[in-house]
Image (cartoon, grey):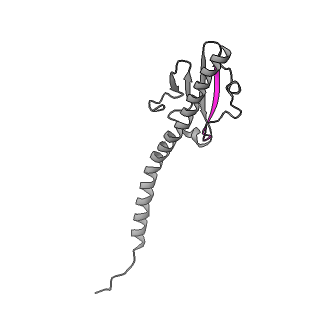
Amino acid sequence: MMPRSKGHTLIELLIGSSLLATVTAMTIPGVAGIIHANQRTDGQLLLLQAAKRQKEHLIYHYRFAKDAGELGYVMPYSPDGHYRLDVVAGNQGRYLMRAIPTRAQMADYNCGYLQIDERGRRSSEHGGENCWR
């Protein structure tokens, strides 16, 4: 009778490490999606604050602002820096503003940029249904 070894064989270690790699590869995309969704609220906040400033600008100047500078933004970025504000169109009766993703948020392919208009209609570049939830 042979004495039992106290360690693991090379085959057992390879099987265990391949299982660990497979599980890790399956969870990383899900975690990235959760991170992008959480960071999306940064762009939503930027647009909602800018929409409020547009309404104030309309009250004082009788027209909507044509750029972020008119709204008082020196650096038109969201609080955490994941989005940049872009006033696409602004005139007396209408505006359209976009939150353009920056840095790692540019990999949010489900939504892309977020946008809002003077009526409060919210949408996104790729039309993902969960972009404003």
11 sits left or right of 43 in the view: left
Q: Nearer the viewer, residue 101 or 92?
A: 92
Q: Nearer the viewer, residue 121 or 5?
A: 121
Picture quadrant of residue 7: bottom left
Residue at the far left in the pictured view: 1
Q: Position of residue 60 (x, y in %)?
A: 66, 17
Looking at the rendering, the stretch of residues picked out in magenta corresponds to 79-91
Residue 13 higher or lower than 77, as above or below: below
- Main secondary structure along the magenta-highlighted residues: strand
Picture quadrant of residue 116: top right
Task: Write the residue at 67% across / 26% down.
Answer: 71
Q: In the rendered structure, does residue 86 fall within the stretch colored magenta?
A: yes
Q: Position of residue 121 (x, y in %)?
A: 51, 21
Q: Nearer the viewer, residue 121 or 26?
A: 121
Q: In the rendered structure, does residue 112 fall within the stretch colored magenta?
A: no
Q: Position of residue 45 (x, y in %)?
A: 55, 33
- Give the total of numbered labels: 0
Task: Write the residue at 62% across / 21% down.
Answer: 56
Task: Write the residue at 62% across / 40% down.
Answer: 81
Give the quarter of the figure containing the C terminus. Answer: top left
Q: Position of residue 114 (x, y in %)?
A: 55, 29
Residue 35 higher or lower than 132, as above or below: below
